[in-house]
Amino acid sequence: MTTAPPQEQRRLLDLQALDTRLAKLAHQRRSLPVLATLAQLEGRGEDLHRAQVEAKTLAADTRRELTKAEADVEQVRARATRHQATLDSGKGLSRELVALQTELAQLADRQSVLEEIELEVMERMEAAEARVSELDVQERAIAADVERATAERDAAWAEIDAEVSTTRAERDRIAAQIDPELLDLYEYARSRTGGLGVVALRGHRTEGAQVDFSLSELAAIDAAGPEEVVVSEEHGYVLVRLDENGASGRALRRRRWSARSASGPSSRATRPRSPVPTSATASTSLRGSRSARRAGSPSGARRRTSPGSSASAPRAGRWPGCFSTATAWSAA
């Protein structure tokens, strides 16, 4: 069984408070509101980046399509120009000149179709480039928001990390004052319970955590000495008793009663008692009471009563000394 002085056991409560504070700081560091904002901004930034890639790809494809449409138009236009020059020179057979005129008409129609296609591609090209520009503006805005949120997160983290450093230094200082065996027991309890290793116990009531004890556990707690380290059988917590010298409330009451008994007889035992009336004292009191009654009667005569009536017996509380007499007769 592990033993440690009560004061050293109580240092575990200080150590537990620091460990709880460190756990809260770690949770606070993980759950800063700015972290959720950053996550949303980063998600939005990723969506914009994908949309930007798609928009740029579409713009590049449209640009190639426009280049091809312009080349087709330019090719038809150049051929029509050559045919028109041949017709204008008048060289060649009439049949050939008629064929050139027919082809010029076809080239004109072809050029009109290709120019329509070129215009349609140019419109799509303008829309794609506008989309790229719009997404670029949004990306820059998201990047600025991410930069501001990152600066806010870093400032909050720096403040938390500073407090963590101070708290951890204080924890190391207190841990150095605790016996290694007791400290290992505390760390083992924390590993089993997920962070809580010690619970304060005042009498049979715990503080900081609700722990129910069986009758055997309560008996073991009451019987444990001040330097004995008590561990909860069911939960594994180290129970630090906060009563005097680490004793439980029942044990304290038992010690105080033993101390009073050892110091001498109690005030109740030394209190003077009223003397018990004897039969002679009772008879004298009774005769005095009867004489006083006859003297106070208007007629001065003694009232006669039948032997079986209740008036022949003294009634308690009517004359002085009557109750004591009856008590004395009963005792006799």
Image (spheres, helix red, strand yellow):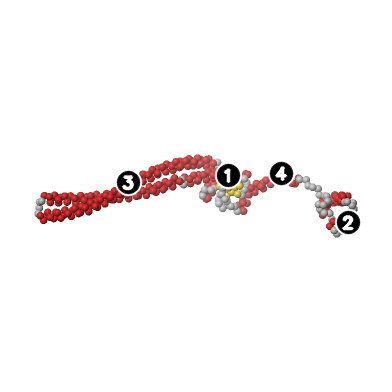
Determine which of the numbered discs, if any, sits on residue 133 in the image.
3
Badge 1 is on which residue? 9
Measuring from the top left, give residue 226's x and y in whole percent. 62, 45
Amino acid type, residue under disc 3 in the picture: Ser
Amino acid type, residue under disc 2 in the picture: Arg
Earlier in the chain: of badge 2 and badge 1, it is 1
Badge 2 is on which residue? 304
**Residue farthest front in this picture:** 298
Earlier in the chain: of badge 4 and badge 2, it is 4
10 Å crowding of disc 1: few (<14), some (14-19), many (20+): many
Earlier in the chain: of badge 3 and badge 1, it is 1
Amino acid type, residue under disc 4 in the picture: Ser
User: Separation of disc 2 and disc 3 at Cα?
Assistant: 134 Å
Badge 4 is on which residue? 263
Q: Is residue 271 left or right of residue 63?
A: right
**Residue farthest bottom in this picture:** 308
Q: Which secondary structure, mark 2?
A: loop
User: Separation of disc 3 and disc 4 at Cα?
Assistant: 97 Å
